[in-house]
Amino acid sequence: MDPFNTRDGHLYAEGVALTEIAERYGTPCYVYSRAAIEEQWRAFDEAFAGAHHLICYAVKANSTLAVLNILAQLGSGFDIVSIGELERVVKAGGDPANVVFSGVGKRTDEMQRALETGIRCFNVESREELQRLDQLAGHMGLRAPVSLRVNPDVDAKTHPHIATGLNESKFGIPITSARAIFAESSTTANVDIVGVGFHIGSQITDMEPFLDALRRLLKLMEELESEGITLKHIDIGGGLGLRYHDEHPPTPAEYGASVLAELEGRPYAIVIEPGRAIAGHAGLLLTKIEYLKHTAQKNFVIVDAAMNDLARPAMYDAWHDIVPVVTGRIRSRERYDIVGPVCESADRLGKERELSVRAGDLLAVRSAGAYGFCMSSNYNSRPRVAEVMVDGENAHLVRRRESLADLMAGEYLLPSYPNGTCA
Ligand SMILES: *Cc1c(COP(=O)(O)O)cnc(C)c1O
């Protein structure tokens, strides 16, 4: 299902016209479809129905409370990478018992809070982290459930900034030293080793790197079994890509079927950590054209959204479809770069796009539901934008636009200033 459909030349989010959303909430704003989020989550759930499995949505892809709450209501688990993400999951009604905690730099206070809430497991990424967790759990009189994140040394064939499974990356325990650490960890007093996992990168559009990593871990698990170490689960991470432009990623059903075929009925539970593939197509960034600027070399559409609102094009050279919200008006088509007001040449949402538009028109930057708002910043002192969730015929504000007062909240002048505040 495409939650964003065109009726009489107007783009809709489910049953609500985007022109109406722009009028009510202003631009720029992110618009999400509840139905699309649910449908993608269910697609993963059905794809793995043949095995004992837990979908742990990767919170970092879109950590807005309303999004987490929708997933919590479906019974989703969550993959977190910071204590801030854990508090969001708890606030959104998620069950800590279904939370896995990833990341190379977990602080002691973060581990402590995660132990207190009773998370499902820590995805431990180094020997040093394992030792720290063991000590802390001992102090707290608790046992820490642990899954070791192994770096399988496979090339995910994705953008270098989002590849994490090569042996030069900071992530995971090198597969060559994994056995030694497992052997050691069976002697740590306060840690229960429950699983093993990998996460090799993001926006992966080919099954082969996943299957390659999976085979390497299954071989490791066999070796461990022969040494008397039996694990309950295998965590295959996230990373399934989307079709942003001309990619052909596997569907969740194809992905699930290939993984289950590779597992051949082995009795492990499977943990899956999809982020992008659940939220990505479920959102768009709605923006208004301020100016059309024509120069001898190039034409520019200057919009009110910018790289601080959606970083992916500037950061990863990523493609997003950019379409007019109202079509069918007769205007000449021209080739434009779509740029924002931020004072950086990298502030470009799209390059050389054919559009027939004029100033004041609305544009939709598609497939912006993942790594969109959550990566936005206040650069150029731009308040972060509003987020709207559409549910059938209704649109709901799920995060208000930041005000100028919000921008400066929490700042102080030096004490030598009278009263310590500005006029
Ligand atoms: C980012 C991340 C994910 C999610 O990746 P997607 O590409 O959004 O599916 C899953 N697991 C870990 C450990 C991550 O860091």
Image (tube, rainbow, N blue to C red):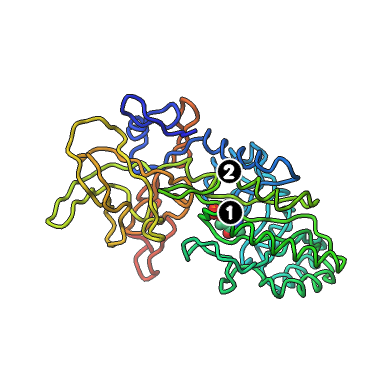
Quarter holding residue 359: top left
Quarter holding the C terminus? Answer: bottom left
Which residue sits at x=32%, y=43%? 287
Depth check: give the residue in front, 75 or 354: 354
Q: Which residue is mark 2?
A: 68
Q: Against 143, is 360 above or below?
A: above
The percent coordinates of residue 158 (x first, y second) are 49, 60
Image quarter for ligand 1 equals: bottom right
- Residue 81 in view, yes or no: no
Indicate the secondary structure of the residue bearing disc 1: helix
Q: Is mark 2 within 8 Å of ligand 1?
A: no
Q: Which residue: 31% across, 51% down?
A: 350
Is residue 350 among what the camera can see? yes
**Residue lying furthest left in this view?**
296
Residue receiving disc 1: 207
| Mark 2 crowdedness (10 Å alpha carbons): few <14, some 14-19, many ≥20 | many
* Alpha carbon separation for disc pair 2 and 1: 27 Å
Answer above or below: position of 241 versus 129. above
Q: With respect to residue 18, does 231 lie above or below?
A: below
The residue type indicated by label 2 comes to Leu
Q: Position of residue 206 (x, y in %)?
A: 54, 54
Query: Which numbered disc flags the more N-terminal residue, 2 or 1?
Result: 2
Q: Give the residue at x 42% y 32%.
A: 13
